[in-house]
Amino acid sequence: MTSPPVPAEREMPGDVRSVKLGVGRAPEGWQERGVGSPQSDGVNLYRPVRGTYVLSFPVTQPTFAVVQLQVYASPAPLSSWARIDGQPVPLVLVENLPRLEMLLAPGLHTLQVTLRCSKNACHSAPRLYGTEVTLRSVRAAIEPGGIAVSRVNADSPGSPLKVRGASPVRSDGVNLYREVSGPEPILLQWPSRLLALKAEYQVFSASGALTVRAEVNDRVVASSQIPARTFTYQTVNLLNAGPAGQTGPLRITFSCQGKTSACFPARLYFTHVETLRGTVREHPLSPLQWAGLILLCLMMLAVLGLWLRLPVPGRFARR
């Protein structure tokens, strides 16, 4: 098996934790539900899954999680769907085994996986031999990017920078990326309160050369010719696009050179925008917080007014 292509610049932090759950194995704070008592197939122990498998677990920092279920069911193929904290999460079958990839914010999370056999009831309860969870720390959604500048990362949990038209976040084993499957435009969108200075992302295609063009309001603001199997940054100066460019959205179009479709799928790595730091607010104030802030300002003004009225020896002395 060959190693995946890796950009020259690796941005994913290296904190990686692998957790294997099985019969009698669960770290503190982790809990499995929906499985029966351990049984044996004559060689290995397994637990039958009763309808929906539920796994609750904590993470302490922004995390990219990969969950792999070692499960067997008859008749094959196995079909599944999943939710994390009540929201649908993409699930793929790798060698007929369910695999999930997701971004998680710090906190306690609950994963639910429902298993079916060929879209029908299984002949017997699916057998769960084990669950492996790989937790890899990722960048925070908003980071300092220089003097008075913040970097807003798209491939982070809770990011205000959204990517429309590409796949959910995936991992090549080293870095996170989004897959671009065809020439349909990709949109980078951010809230209007963020005044973006520039957008930047790295593009890669394993199979063919491509052209990547960026537009704001139908105006081309960047265009790059990218050879096959070459990681290339495209930097878009949004100041040149005027006020409309700073509030987005940014439209990115991929096209294969030579009028073929050989460059797909392509990949987007390290997608981010840089904004004026004062325009970024991760946690907007609630009405109650605004009221408290206004009350505090009034109290400070009252104290200042009282202090100015106090007689101070020598301050206003007249000769």
Image: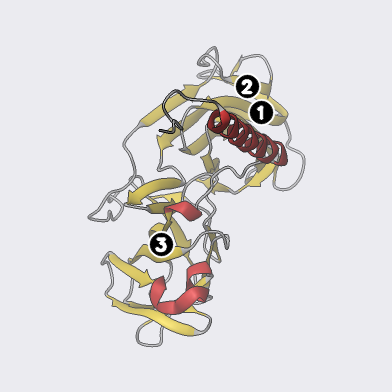
Label 1 element class: strand
Q: Earlier in the sequence, mark 1 or mark 3?
A: 1
> What residue does disc 1 label?
54
Q: How many numbered marks, from 0 up?
A: 3
- With respect to residue 155, does 140 lie above or below? above
Specify the label residue 268 is tagged with: 3
Image coordinates of residue 179 in percent, x first then y, are 46, 61
Q: Is 75 left, or right, of 120 in this rendering?
A: left
Q: Amino acid at mark 1?
A: Val
* Inter-mark Cα distance, 1 to 3: 32 Å
Q: Which element is circle 2 on?
A: strand
x then y, percent, for residue 46: 58, 21
The disc, 2 or 3, on the residue closer to the chain's N-terminal end is 2
As drawn, is 281 to the left or to the right of 210? right
**Rendered view: 106 above or below 146:** above
On the image, the x and y values in percent for residue 147 come to: 32, 52
Q: Is there a contact, CB below 8 Å, between mark 2 and mark 1?
A: yes
> Which residue is found at the position 40% from the left and 62% from the top?
268
Above or below, 115 relative to 145: above
Which residue is at the front of the view, 291 or 250?
A: 291
Cα–Cα gap, marks 2 and 3? 35 Å
Q: Amino acid at mark 2?
A: Glu
Using the image, determine if residue 148 lies above or below residue 242. Answer: above
Q: Which residue is mark 2?
A: 32
Q: Please give left or right for residue 268 compared with residue 128 in the image.
A: left
In the rendered image, the quadrant that contains the C terminus is top left
